[in-house]
Amino acid sequence: MRNLTPTAVVLQARAAWRYRGQERPPFAIEPGADQRSVWDFPRPPSIESVGAELRVEGSGEMIALTTRGRRVSETASAPTYYFPPEDVISKNLKQTGASYHCEWKGISNELALPSVRQPGWVLTAVYPEFAELSGWYAFYPQYVSCFIDAERVGAQPGGYYGGWVTADLVGPIKGLSGTESW
């Protein structure tokens, strides 16, 4: 695992985001008393410790289980939950060799299970702001069953992002066509 240095291209991509969590756009849903608006999340994204039990199941097995997870929250997106490598249980989980780049976190490698093509990813090279998540795993609720305590979470719209949609979130949430600049 290594740290990356942001290049001019990455810094330009980071600067291009219109919304940064300081104000909600006019189309944002006003949160109720027990709700959180994805429009109040910051950009750059924040990292928070999560004491709740995070659990991932798929292919007939427990894939990961932790009470030491991290939540990454970014403006307009459902939070993504990360698992320390020692709390990833599945011996069948393998890296595919495909990699992806996030202008905030860095480079991740795609994961696969025998019967699930892309259950998640592992951060393999990170920007300094995300150094604490180097080597940590995240999972897509659209491909595997993901839980926070007893709540089974939904998938962020659109199929690209790995955000975990919980009952307390209001949006609209980025992911569908036309929301790329949010």
Image (spheres, rainbow, N blue to C red):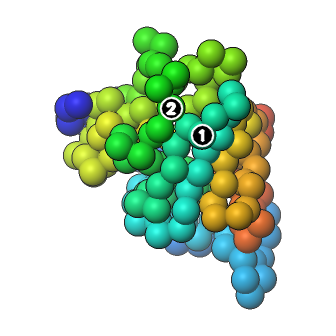
Numbered badge on residue 13: none
Labels 2 and 1: the sequence-earlier one:
1
- Helix, strand or loop status at disc 2: loop
Name the foreground residue: 109 vs 75.
109
5 displayed left or right of 77: left
Where in the figure is residue 101, as x and y percent of width and height? 43, 28
Q: Mark 2: few, some, or many residues within 10 Å (few <14, many ≥20)?
A: some
- Helix, strand or loop status at disc 1: strand
Q: Which residue is mark 2?
A: 90
Is residue 3 in sight in this rendering? yes
Q: Which residue is mark 1?
A: 62
Residue visible at 38% across and 34% down?
Answer: 123
Residue visible at 68% across and 27% down?
Answer: 59
156, above or below 95, in the image: below
* Residue at the extreme bottom of the image, as rendered: 33
Where in the figure is residue 20, as x and y percent of width and height? 51, 61
| Location of residue 36 (image quadrant) | bottom right
Name the foreground residue: 38 vs 116.
116
The quadrant in which the N terminus is found is top left
Report the Cα–Cα distance between label 2 and label 1.
Answer: 7 Å
- Is the Cβ of the residue at disc 2 closer than 8 Å to that at disc 1? yes
Residue type at mark 2 is Ser
Residue visible at 50% across and 32% down?
Answer: 90
Is residue 170 in sight in this rendering? no
47 displayed left or right of 81: left
Where in the figure is residue 72, as x and y percent of width and height? 47, 55
Residue type at mark 1 is Met
Where in the figure is residue 58, as x and y percent of width and height? 67, 34
55, above or below 177, in the image: below
